[in-house]
Image (cartoon, rainbow, N blue to C red):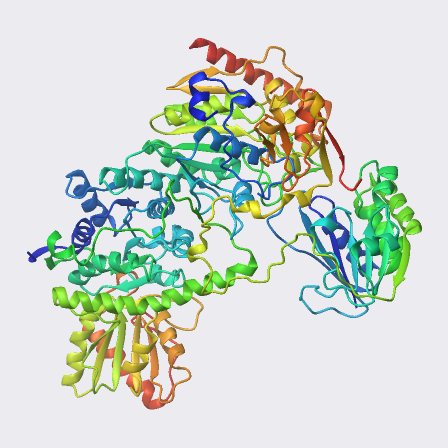
Amino acid sequence: MIEVRMHGRGGQGVVASAEMLAVSAIRDGKYAQAFPSFGPERRGAPVVAFCRVDDHTIITREPISVPDVVVVLDPTVLRAVQATAGLKPGGKLVVNTCLRPEELARDLGVGGCTVATVDANRIALQFIGQAITNTAMLGALLKVEPVASLEVLYGLLRERFPAVADMNIQALQAAYDETSVAEFVMGDIVMGDKRKKLVTDLPTWRTIDHACIVFEPGSSVQYYTGDWRSMRPDWNSEKCVKCGKCWMYCPEAAINVDEHRDYKVDYDYCKGCGICAEECPYGVIVMVEECE
Amino acid sequence: MDMEQSRQKRSFAPRALPHEEYFAPGHRGCQGCGPALAFRHILKALGPNTVVAEATGCGEIISSPYPQSSWRVPWIHTAFENTAATAAGIEVAYKVLMRKGRIPEERINVVAMAGDGGTGDIGLQALSGALERGHDFIYVCYDNEAYMNTGMQRSGLTPFGAFTTTSPAGKVSKGQSTWKKDVPAIAAAHHIPYVATACISYMSDLYRKILRAAEARGPAYLHVLAPCPTGWRYPSEKTIEIGRMAVRSGVFNLYEIVDGKKRLTVKVRERLPVSEYIKAQGRFRHLTDEDIAYIQRRVYEEYEALLAEAAQI
Amino acid sequence: MARIVGMEISAACSEAVTLADADVIAAYPITPQTHIVEHLSEQVADGRLDAEYINVESEHSAMSCCIGAAAAGARTFTATAAQGLALMSEMLYIASGMRLPIVMALVTRTLSAPLSIWGDQSDIMSVRDCGWIVLFAENGQEVYDMTLQAFRIAEDERVIFPVMVCLDGFHLSHVIEPVEILDRAEIAPFLPPYKPKYRLDPHNVLTMGAFAMPEYFSEIKKRQDEELVSSYHVILEVWREWEERFGRHYEPLNPYRVDDAEVVVVIAGTFAGTARVAVDRLREKGIKAGLASLKLWRPFPRDDIKRLFARRRVLTVVDRALSVGGAGGPVANELRAAFYHEDGRPWVASFVAGLSGRDILAEDFVEMVERSLEYAKKGEFPPYEMYGVRE
């Protein structure tokens, strides 16, 4: 059995990818499962989806906690989640990034597994015109773990999305061809903890709050939605006339004003929606790629 | 500047708005969430002596994942269809407890908040009951025109022609087949002191209306159009622009009804063709020119009727 | 000073709410609850009770208003029956989960269809798992006493749960009886003004009704369950204090001639009175019969049940509710389950009777006991029997 975990952001087609992978495998005569992980987070938030493929009937309903393959659709997700958590020793990490596998492995400090990388953003922009990377990343995945055949997947894409199938197939094929793979025998699958607070001390029934009451007003500030961002607002303060529209229209209250009436983005919470840049009458703010 | 100064000056320019934030960052709303922006400013306008009862829906789920909360005013969620009733219970409790001397006498804004479904569909009965009984509270409908919390299913307030997951455009369907339910008119039919429509893209208009709603003695109903990039299918940075286009095209009109008298608060000099609003959103992508012409005609008629009605007074 | 007054039991319930100085009442009229809310409306209209009475537009809103009012710190009361309870059932679970000390009089009535306004206990049994403390009254005095006790139990900081007082529709609600009425000076030390531990207060900001992800939900429900179960001790404490102050005794299973009984009738609600008459007749016939009147349904008085019923030969359990397609009367089944692992457990004969206001006479109880003994002799019991139904 091959177990795959996919990381991306809400709205990037992570769940659809897992589903297409499973349906393709089933059409190939295999047995497969795909399932999402549900939470309150919305478009832009890190999300995961899962896929299992086997030659035999799969009866387990357990979550996938020790995956054979981890696929990361959006490089900025690596800041927010521990993508390698639970990856099987000798497992495969497939990431959308402009870095080479060696560079990524060094950056993440991972070893003892196979690392595959592909610049799916560039490929998606080239063939689809938008940075929608889910189909490209399926190509990368199939390169390192052929759980389904390309032909079947192409057929499925043509059937499901006739209008955009061709461009997606081109992106998928390009990603398949361009994916670089390297195996790292030495080291352990670990990843530096990037501020992500691991919840280890969950309350017991004796210590949990009465009636689920939240006693700390505004305690959501403990949750850093800056991790959701794939584009960031960049400020050219010299042009700013301090009109305050960016501040007013920010749905996150993530723009602060200091004593000099200078407006500053709080990148801990900015989700990168781009409203401030769009609404700024003086072109002070521009949105730039987060990973650049 | 605090709200009192802004209120006295009746100035709601961005720099004049209160800096206190009562809807904290870290909420789980989508990038470019219109309702989150509405909550942020409604609370700024009302200030800390405010209690919010909120219906199940986007606003509730993005703001209250135990053990965290985005709310810096007292806030309660109980269920989906009963927000007006929950708020009514809070309002009478304060009234009687103050009368009996159990809590200090003070003005507390009791606010009920619900989405379009929680207001105009499943919550309509409780809303009507609370308006009819005359509770001194503010009801805010944040209208994002479908059940976005559960993944974009149609409500009675989804506009004609819009694609949703339960009003899909198909071989024999053009998406939503019904016209948007006029909930502000239903609220006004209860002869309450204050009814208004507002949009997050017209912030000073919104502030003025929240303050008027708070000043009203008795029920006030505020219907706030809050565009949703996820459900309406437009890029997240366009939230304010889309709201602006809804108003400029006459699709969503900004007015208030004070003691039964209707007044347009934002008059559009040059109206934008409805097609520009429609073509900016993926949810209308399937509509033909003919469909858009139909919508344009009806929007025009409704706007003219509104002008005539408002002019009579 | 306490005085005995002949009055309708619904009015006695309302008098108790007035004496409790409730702050908010939100209710929607439904037969046979109407006399309670009409009487309360009058009390408020006459200024005898300084409360806000909200004429809500449905029972769902009644409970929602109560939840809002209780969350804001008010002592809160409502009353309903049957369809009304079914309509508000969503909010019953929420009132308990949010731990709000609301008190409700449930004038028990059957559930439609077919529509029937008459009494049985189908309504309360349909919400067995809603997380409320549930008391059953047997007579007018108990309705009055339990309504006052309910506020005290609900608001106790070791409890903070909503409490339901069940009184049988018509057979209790519409009957005129002597009831001993207390005055404010007498009740004040027993029931001081409500001081909420948590409330919606702009000067002490709380978030109520947050949603819980799976990693928290089970712990929250476990805490709710543990605390509902342990409210048992507070209920007993309150009942002991009531007896000390007012001389009337309450216990979870009120026994009658049980000490040497071979067969014990178990029933909740007002027909326990008639069952007492039947027990006396059975004794005259030489049958060692007894009775247990179930006063506390939630938390389920497991230990009292085991103590009182261990080593009895037969229990004749009379349920005024039918579990359609199920395995027997609701009370009978819970008793069976309580004894499943016990040695020397009694036989449990389950009878469903008194549906939709149909009377249960003393002779019916006699018949049910005799039938139970016959089953025991044969060693064979039907899962349940619908008593008195025309074949």
Residue B21 placement, left or right of A132: left
Work out whether residue C262 or residue C66 is closer to the camera in this orientation and state it: C66
Expressed as whole percent of the image width and height from the top left, the position of residue A253 reads: 58, 35
Work out whether residue B169 or residue B32 is closer to the camera in this orientation and state it: B32
Q: Is residue C1 visible?
A: yes
Expressed as whole percent of the image width and height from the top left, the position of residue A161 reads: 80, 43
Q: Is residue C183 visible?
A: no
- Identified at 81% across, 58% down, the residue is A93
Vertical relation: C52 (above or below) C293: above
Q: How many discs mark residues in the rendered view?
A: 0
Vertical relation: B117 (above or below) C287: above
Extreme-front residue of the structure: A260
Residue B103 placement, left or right of B296: left
Extreme-right residue of the structure: A177
Quadrant that contains the C terminus of chain B: top left
* Residue C269 placement: quadrant: bottom left
Expressed as whole percent of the image width and height from the top left, the position of residue B189 reads: 40, 25
Vertical relation: B249 (above or below) A115: above
Residue B31 placement, left or right of B55: right
Expressed as whole percent of the image width and height from the top left, the position of residue C39 reads: 18, 46
Work out whether residue C358 or residue C135 is closer to the camera in this orientation and state it: C135
